[in-house]
Amino acid sequence: MMHLNRVATATFALGLAAAITAGKMDSASAQGAKCEPDQIATKYPSLAGKTIKVATDAESPPYSFRDPKDFNRVIGIDVDMARAAFKCIGAKMELSLGAWSGLLPSVIAGQNDLMWDDLYYTAKRAEQVDYVAYMVAGTGGLVRKGNPKNIHDFADLCGLTGTAGLGTVEEAALRDQSKKCVDGGKKEINILTYPDISSGVRLLQNDRADVMVTDLALVDQLASDNPTLFERGIKVLSDFKIGVAVRKGNKDLLSAIYDSLTALHGNGEQKQIFGNYKVDAGLIVTPTVLTK
Amino acid sequence: MKSFLKRYGWVCATVLVVAAIAVWFFISENQSGGEGAPGNTLSNLASGPAAAQEKISWGREILSYVTLPFLLEGAFLAIKISALAMLGGLVMGLGLALLRLSRFSVVRALAWTYIWLVRGTPQLLQLVFLYDALPEIGIKLDTFTTAVLGFALNEAAFSAEIIRGGILSVNRNQSLAAAAFGMGPLLTMRRIVLPQAMRAILPAIANDTVSMIKLTSIGSVIFVNELTFRSQQIVGQNFKFFTVFIAAGIIYLIMTSAISLIQAALERRFNLEIERPAPGSGFFDRFVGFRSMPPSSGEATVPPAVDPAGRATKKTGSGSPSIWVDALMAHEHWRAPVEQKPFVTCRDVWKSYGTREVLRGINLTVNRGEVVTVMGPSGSGKSTLLRLINHLEGLDRGEILVEDKHVGYELANGRLKPSRNLAKARAAARIGMVFQHFNLFEHFTALENIIEAPVRVYGEKPENATVLAHKLLSGVGLARHAAHLPHRLSGGQQQRVAIARALAISPRLMLFDEPTSALDPELVSEVLGVIRRLAEAGMTMIVVTHEVRFAREVADRVVFMDDGRIVEEGTPDQVLVNPTQERTQRFLRLVEHEIEVA
């Protein structure tokens, strides 16, 4: 019996791995592709009656930010997706607001159940949490209008000042590039980290930084909304995925998120939400579960 | 309540006016902040041609953010966290400060380790540790609890040092006097030391409170949705950092200004230089001050008709202090006979401070009703001997008996061991002590000084104690000064209050440690007069003094000490007029010379 269980688990894992590359999860989970909120007790028993705590920072547009018409509301593609997902699952959710750098640690510590706030998938992070990826990300570098320092590529940043969010993938990319600069005999990149988006923008605006490296969607929005101030200098379409981070070991929650996101993907709600915030629907991908 | 309003009416008025203005703006402005902060997106960074118009409306915009309920909720959260954390921190800090002052080195070391650890690590890391690391061992706290706990634990370390500094700044003689009257360490700390330490403690604690209110902003890392985080969220979507952050700053300023007002009010309360009305009966006063009693008007001192014969039958050292009051107020000089029963017996008393021997084998007996003056050069051990008699300090060798009992010692295996509750033993012995530097409790009026020990140590009713205190004050001629603080009295007056204070506990023995040495010559006689009357009424007294004339006229016996030993003793005629020892003669020549010069 034990032997069979092991085989079954291994097969499932293999199937997952295959799906990551081939993206064929649709057929494998056809039965989870519908929204059945009243079935929560049978589908995800450990979630029934619980309020799920979603960690987000409410200061990262367009993913999570305060509604300018009513400061008591938090909106954004990630927050709206979360609301739609939990409506689909049939469980109550509660937003837990904190500074971005504290969000993931709180999920790992168990203080919150999941993090949904422009979190990129990395193998290192996947050692601590499980992901359900639902969109791809690009990295963008925002520069001042006229691109005075002539920045078009990461390699152009040697000897300049760059800023990125504390603890983000972009910060890691800058450090990586700085090392490459030094190895190539050039000056290193002076890296400033910012605690939140608006302070990063101020760094750029006040000429304390030459480039602000962050999510491509955000960079495009900032550039198009402030054509006299900024423009996009760098665009890198990586295979970075953005996903929901769930604490390891929470199988029911992971399946629930995966199933609901698949449903939202299928019935067009995800596309609609993206459209509300003028985010490029081309960034949407089929939801996938990433556990390492 | 009325007196509170009278004193702090201006504070209340200011607070009410500010609150009224805030409420008015709150009601009159658009609640959601939509007007003052037009629905903006990321495009608000551009300040183009609209800049000129924008400048005029900056003021209104800032004001709209200052009154924004969304931000005010964050401010309220900051206040809640700070209030609870300061409360907890101060209580723990007081405990830590007392541990730091403990006799036991292990206790002191533990307290110091905590302070060293918590003071020396960043508060942000402490908060993250409490929130994210504790769950690993099964302790999961919600954000509010974590914030309050984290700030409280941190504040405890800092306020422990502040409080300890305040306690150490109080003159040691204050606790010495309290100990002499049988007040235990906790009672002394609560009633005498801490109230006086408050003047040093308050400004620093107010500093910490102001800092904490602003420091709550680091709570955003552990999901506390307070004022700074909320303003960052607003800026996160409209990028108007200038107006929003100024508004947040104004809100912080209002909160911290309230702290400053409270600080000013508290400092007034503890300021000894301000004339206070009669103490109120609020909770705080009852804890720190005393129950409200109507101050009696200065009464004329009418000496009661007491017949000398009646006095002869009264046993010395028993009954209420009214005997002494009568004696103090009497005009005739009459002397009760001295009984031949030993009252104080010192047998082979030795005492050293470190390697220095201060007392070397003192043998002394004082009979009931006897007045013994102890004289000698400074350093001869006179004051030390007095302190050993009422066990303010411990014996090294030998024994001292007061009324055939050890004061604060128990016999264990044939050896004397200090008993566990020294304060209780001193209180039971009823030994009154008067110090060279008066050592009145600085923060109490003359009246409060006198009733403190009877009420707190001996459990007498405050009303009775107050009546007696007034009588005693009349007896020493200070009826009009009942409501005066010590610093308002002259040295002679303070010493007379000190004598009254000692009499209030119905002492069986009075110890005077150079009672007039710190006084101007003109004031010496008024104090000596009081002591003389007590002697005549039959009080058993040991008086350490330089006053040769007083000794000649009042003392039954004179003891001359030098270098830790009794050199000569006898009647005043024997020792002062015809001293046999060389050292005595030398000393007397010195003292008489001083008197002539003065």
Image: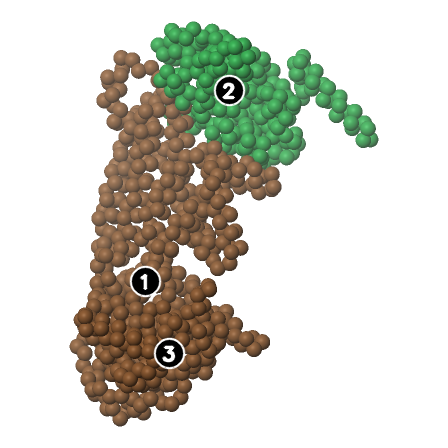
Chain colours: A green, B brown
In this view of the protein, can residue A266 be seen by the observer?
no
- The residue lying toward the viewer, choosing from A154 and B340, is B340
Residue at the image position 49 percent from the left and 73 percent from the top = B397
In this view of the protein, can residue A242 be seen by the observer?
yes
* Residue A15 x/y as whole percent: 72, 18
- The residue lying toward the viewer, choosing from B340 and B107, is B340
Asked if residue B434 is positioned above or below residue A167 in the image, the reply reads below
Determine which residue is flagged by label 2: A171
- The three-letter code of the residue at mark 2 reads Glu
Determine which residue is flagged by label 1: B289
CB within 8 Å, label 3 to label 1: no
Subunit ID for the residue under disc 3: B
Question: Spatial distance from mark 3 to mark 2, Cα to Cα?
Answer: 88 Å
User: Which numbered tag is attached to residue B567?
Assistant: 3
- The three-letter code of the residue at mark 3 reads Val
Residue at the image position 38 percent from the left and 83 percent from the top = B366
Asked if residue A53 is positioned above or below residue B426 in the image, the reply reads above
- The residue lying toward the viewer, choosing from A143 and A87, is A143
